[in-house]
Image (cartoon, coloured by chain):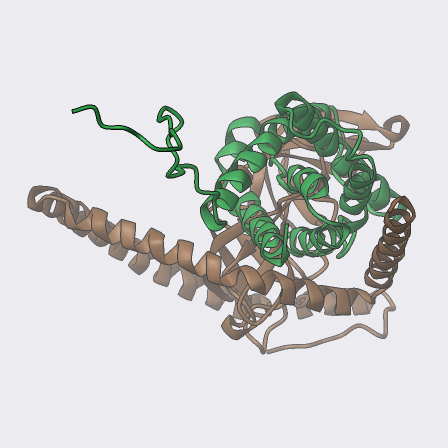
Chain colours: A brown, B green
């Protein structure tokens, strides 16, 4: 009996080691497809929970009194009027912006459309930061697209299946974002948003690393995406500087950044889907190109639109 | 234990991983996501055969990794090693005792993340580890310690509900004396 157990354990060990070795040696893309296929097994449960949530919400709506509804209606009408006024002003600003862009020769930036996804799962492991959302390839989601909330940037799409996607969040080692800070002397300093070196498991804290050694960033200053690299469009708010310290014997400065988005309690995420015809990053201005061409740089691009 | 028990254990693993990924109140309150698979593995190793242990390690590990940024399959080996060690020594363990179950749950819940992290770091990954990891291990240990005896109770109830029970009310009454032989009526 004892020998039989030993043999069974040994065979079991070989089987498991083989399975693990094969899985870990799979190419990254194949592994990603396998992962998404297996995580698809949870979709019935996620769908069931989602529909239960909707039913609970509808039930809650039924028991709202008429007086409360009227008050909410009045409040929304006021808000609607204010938004209409803002929209008119924004349209005027956009026209003015377009005229100035034409004058300077800058290509118009297309912000892309936003797709709202509901967070259906958080990473069950304590050592990664990711969430799964209910948007997939059928909704136009692609790997690498930036994700945000109304508060600010939260991360980027890591893998996509037909029906759901995995979004890796800021602070995870798999996400690095080029970010900039407008300092008090009107100069922009750029660095890279990465995992916090002092508190890596702090949900809403990241580092802005590789700032210049003579950086003058100070607590409270706004950190936004820079747009370098083409993944994240420029201008998305990320957070505010908390403090800074010198690194690499004074060669660089590292600042801690408190994120605007609360990553611990994400329920909905907007994925920024760019149009097919435009790149994520604006093309360089032809006027600047012409300027550089005067300084003997023959191979400069002069794309105009 | 039969095939039905194995299927039931695997179904519990599926639901456990779903709950780990979906239910956020423990994560929000304590900053830690508790893991129920090591506790379930302790239960499976103490009550089931080696096939169930292997199936739980592979399927549970795959389900867990599919919702995580872990490379697929990295959780399988730690789960299996916990299961196989307990399974080999289970005749020596006092598996019926609440305290023994709890201690095994605590040890398994601490060893599983540690072994997984070891594999991850050896594979060139950079997981998020810091001083808070000690707090996470502490909470995981407690959660595993509570969950293991709970699994024993749940499965005992299920088994009681699904299996035939021996009939306890026998027609024979112990307080009645049967006298054999002829009886004489005096009147």
Taking the spot 77% from the left edge, 54% from the top edge, the residue there is B71
Q: Residue furthest top?
A: B99
Viewer-nearest residue: A148 or B165: B165
Number of callouts? 0
- Specify the quadrant of the image occupied by residue A67: top left
Viewer-nearest residue: B162 or B53: B162
Viewer-nearest residue: B135 or A231: B135
Look at the picture and state if B111 lies above or below A232. above
- Specify the quadrant of the image occupied by residue A54: bottom left
Q: Can residue A267 be seen in this view?
A: yes
Locate residue A101 relative to residue A123 in the image: left or right.
left
Taking the spot 85% from the left edge, 44% from the top edge, the residue there is B119
Viewer-nearest residue: A106 or B181: B181
Taking the spot 28% from the left edge, 55% from the top edge, the residue there is A55
Instruction: Give the x, y percent position of residue B73.
Output: 77, 55
Instruction: Give the x, y percent position of residue A280.
Output: 62, 65
Locate residue B85 relative to residue B151 in the image: left or right.
right
- Specify the quadrant of the image occupied by residue A36: bottom right
Instruction: Give the x, y percent position of residue A217.
Output: 67, 30
Q: Is residue A117 visible?
A: no
Instruction: Give the x, y percent position of residue A207.
Output: 70, 35
Q: In which quarter of the image is the C terminus of chain A?
A: bottom right
Locate residue B169 relative to residue A99 in the image: left or right.
left
């Amino acid at each position: 009996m004892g020998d039989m157990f030993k043999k069974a354990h040994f065979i079991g060990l070989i089987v498991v080691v083989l399975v693990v070795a094969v899985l870990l040696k799979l190419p990254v893309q194949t592994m990603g497809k396998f992962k998404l296929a297996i995580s698809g097994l949870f979709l019935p449960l996620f769908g069931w929970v989602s529909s239960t949530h909707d039913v609970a919400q509808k039930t809650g709506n039924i028991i709202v009194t008429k007086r409360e509804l009227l008050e909410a209606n009045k409040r929304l009408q006021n808000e609607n009027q204010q938004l209409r006024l803002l929209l008119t002003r924004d349209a005027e600003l956009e026209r003015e912006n377009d005229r100035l862009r034409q004058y300077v020769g800058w290509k118009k930036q297309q912000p892309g459309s936003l797709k709202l996804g509901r967070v259906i799962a958080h990473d069950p492991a304590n050592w990664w930061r990711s969430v799964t959302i209910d948007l997939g390839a059928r909704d136009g989601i692609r790997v690498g697209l930036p994700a945000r909330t109304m508060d600010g940037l939260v991360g980027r799409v890591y893998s996509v299946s037909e029906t759901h996607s995995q979004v890796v969040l800021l602070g995870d080692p798999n996400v690095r974002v080029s970010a900039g800070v407008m300092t008090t002397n009107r100069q922009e300093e750029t660095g890279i948003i990465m995992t916090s070196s002092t508190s890596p498991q702090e949900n809403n804290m990241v580092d802005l690393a590789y700032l210049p050694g003579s950086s003058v960033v100070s607590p409270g200053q706004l950190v936004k995406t820079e747009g370098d690299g083409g993944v994240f469009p420029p201008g998305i708010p990320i957070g505010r500087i908390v403090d800074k310290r010198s690194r690499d014997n004074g060669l660089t400065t590292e600042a801690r950044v408190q994120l605007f988005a609360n990553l611990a309690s994400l329920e909905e995420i907007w994925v920024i889907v760019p149009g097919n015809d435009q790149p994520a990053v604006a093309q360089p201005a032809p006027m600047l190109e012409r300027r550089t061409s005067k300084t003997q740089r023959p191979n400069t691009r002069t794309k105009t639109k | 234990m039969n095939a039905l028990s194995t299927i039931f254990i695997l179904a519990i693993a599926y639901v456990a991983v779903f709950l780990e990924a979906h239910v956020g109140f423990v994560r929000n309150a304590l900053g830690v996501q508790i893991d129920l698979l090591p506790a379930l593995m302790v239960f499976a190793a103490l009550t089931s055969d080696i096939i169930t242990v292997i199936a739980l390690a592979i399927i549970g590990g795959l389900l867990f990794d599919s919702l995580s940024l872990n490379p697929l399959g990295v959780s399988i080996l730690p789960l299996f090693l916990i299961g196989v060690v307990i399974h080999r020594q289970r005749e020596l363990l006092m598996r019926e005792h609440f305290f023994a179950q709890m201690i095994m749950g605590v040890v398994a819940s601490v060893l599983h993340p540690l072994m997984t992290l070891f594999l991850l770091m050896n594979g060139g990954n950079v997981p998020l580890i810091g001083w808070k990891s000690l707090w996470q291990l502490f909470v995981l240990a407690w959660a595993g310690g509570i969950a293991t005896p709970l699994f024993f109770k749940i499965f005992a109830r299920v088994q009681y509900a699904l299996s035939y029970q021996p009939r306890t009310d026998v027609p024979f009454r112990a307080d009645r004396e049967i006298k054999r032989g002829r009886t004489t009526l005096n009147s």
